[in-house]
Amino acid sequence: MTLRSLAQELTEPHLTMIGGRIGKAPGLLTELREAVSGSTSGDGGGSASKVGILVNASALDLLNAIEVEVRSSFADRHGQGAPTLEKCIELIGEGEHPTEWQEYFAGRFTGYRDQINGLLRPKKMRRLDGVACPSCGLSMFGEERSTCLYLDCYLNEDKELKHISEWQVHCQSCNATWVHGDMQWLLVALGQ
Ligand SMILES: [Zn+2]
C-alpha cells in the first residue's frame, strides 16, 4: 500500500471488506477513539463488561503511543508540529519524502493499522485448555490463570477450518510459536 492510502485508512472513512461484502468503514483512528470512549457499537451497549474495560484501556494505551510517536516523527521531519494527530498523518500521507522517511512512515503506519485491527477485531482462535506449552511448561499463566496456548486454525469468523498445513500454535505466556511440522506434540496432547 502507498503511504497516502495508509494515511487515508487511518484517518478517513474508506471502503473495505466487511463480512465478505464491500462496505464503508470509518478511519481506524476514529474506531480506536470510539473504543477508548466505550462507544463501540455491537457488544455491550454501554454495559461496563470486564472485557470492555480491558479493551478500552488497551485502546487508550495504543492511541497514546501512536500519538506520541507520530507527533515526534512529524516534528523531526518538518521541524514543527501540527494541530492534531490526524492532521499530522494526513500531511505525512500527502507529502513528498526522501526514501528513508518514506519507508519509515510506511512501516510505522502499517504497524498502526495492524495493531488497531488486532485490538478491535481479534482473530478467532481455538483455546487449548489444559495443554502444557512444550517451551515454558505452563498450561495457564498470570493471576487470571489465563490459558497459554491458542491454535490459529480458523479461516474466518464462521470458524471454517484452514488447511492443516497453515495451522499455528501460539503461547501467550512465553510467545513461542509452532507451525505445521513442529506440532506432533500437540496432536499427541489432544489425543490423550
Ligand atoms: Zn509457553
Image (spheres, rainbow, N blue to C red):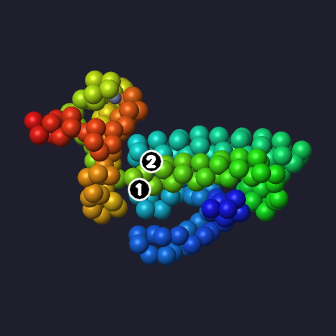
Determine crowd level at label 1: few under 14, some 14-19, many 20+ residues with C-alpha closer than 10 A: few
Q: Which mark is residue 52?
A: 2
Ligand 1 rendered quadrant: top left
Confirm whether residue 151 shows in the render.
no
Q: Is residue 73 above or below residue 1?
A: above
User: How many other residues sit within 10 Å of disc 2, few (<14), some (14-19) or many (≥20)?
Assistant: some
Looking at the image, residue 46 lies above or below residue 150: below
Circles 2 and 1: CB atoms closer than 8 Å: yes
CA separation in Å, label 2 and label 1 = 8 Å
Q: Residue furthest bottom?
A: 22
* Residue at image point 35% right, 61% down: 156
Q: Position of residue 183 (x, y in %)?
A: 25, 39
Residue at the farthest left position? 192
On screen, residue 99 versus residue 116, left or right, reads: right
Is the distance from the Cβ of mark 1 to the nearest ligand 1 atom less than 8 Å? no
Identify the element where label 1 is drawn. loop
Q: Is residue 97 left or right of residue 21?
A: right
Which image quarter holds the N terminus?
A: bottom right
Residue 20, image quadrant: bottom left
Residue at point 41%, 58% (across, down): 43
Q: On the rendered structure, is 39 left or right of 132?
A: right
Q: Tell me which amino acid carries mark 2.
A: Gly
7 relative to 40 in the view: left or right:
right
Whole-percent x and y of residue 28? Answer: 59, 58
Label located before the other in sequence (2 or 1): 1
Residue at the right extreme of this rendering: 79
Tag 1: residue type?
A: Gly
Which residue in the protein does label 1 denote?
A: 44
